[in-house]
Image (spheres, rainbow, N blue to C red):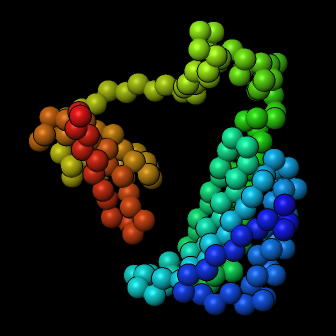
Amino acid sequence: MANKVEIQTRNIRLTERIEEYVNKKAGNLDHYLPAIDDARVELSHHKAARDANDRNVAQITVFGKGFTLRSEVRSDEALAAFDAALENMQRQIERHKGKHYRGRGDGRSAAEVTEEAIDDETGELSPLVARRKKFILFPMSEEEAVIQMRDLGHDNFFVFYNAETSRINVLYRRRNGSYGLIEPVLG
């Protein structure tokens, strides 16, 4: 795969040193997962980013038969962002390998579990729900939901019943530290 690494840059001059460094590091990804067919690396610089640590973005995408893995990291330096994105990609590859190549811990292999998941009538894979969780929703305002989210230590999102709109909402933390609110509407 070493010769199939495609490098794209935006607002960054691709020097020979950067190209050599990226090819050397990203070209070794097939050592972690031989099923990788193609890898793309995109390095970009955003002058208008609010925070200096978000100005350089490295995005790595790998393609294989039946899967696509993607990692994106922002940093103050392009190669530092690339190195961090590469580490994230290696973790994703390990998780991907674990899902497809290792046993499950209950004596059955991943292939045996996949065979059970095939629908007899259509021959297609039926969806697998890895975990179900039930919890009681108490009516609360958006401000109370933010407080609950902080107190419970939920870093990414918080589901709550909005007392003002009488609907279930999802509160989430944005990259810049502010909060966003998803208000689902039936279509």
List x then y, in percent, for residue 150: 37, 52
Give the answer, above or below, for where 73 lies relative to 122. Answer: below
Toward which corner of the image does residue 168 lie, by quadrant?
Answer: top left
Q: The N terminus lies in which quarter of the figure?
A: bottom right
Name the outermost residue toward the top.
Answer: 121
List x then y, in percent, for residue 98: 76, 38
Position of 38 compared to 159: left or right? right
Toward which corner of the image does residue 125 lie, by quadrant?
Answer: top right
Question: Which of these two is toward me, 43 or 130?
Answer: 43
List x then y, in percent, for residue 82: 68, 73
Question: Which of these two is toward me, 100 or 104?
Answer: 100
Give the answer, above or below, for where 15 lies relative to 181. Answer: below
- Regarding residue 77, the answer to whether it shows in the image is yes
Toward which corner of the image does residue 131 lie, by quadrant?
Answer: top right
Question: Residue placed at 65% from the left, 60% from the top?
Answer: 61
Question: Which of these two is toward me, 43 or 183?
Answer: 43
Question: Residue placed at 77% from the left, 42% from the top?
Answer: 97
Q: The C terminus lies in which quarter of the figure?
A: top left
Question: Which of these two is toward me, 134 or 47?
Answer: 47
Question: Residue placed at 35% from the left, 48% from the top?
Answer: 149
Question: Residue placed at 65% from the left, 49% from the top?
Answer: 68
Give the answer, above or below, for where 184 lies relative to 124. Answer: below
List x then y, in percent, for residue 24: 84, 74
- Regarding residue 151, the answer to whether it shows in the image is no
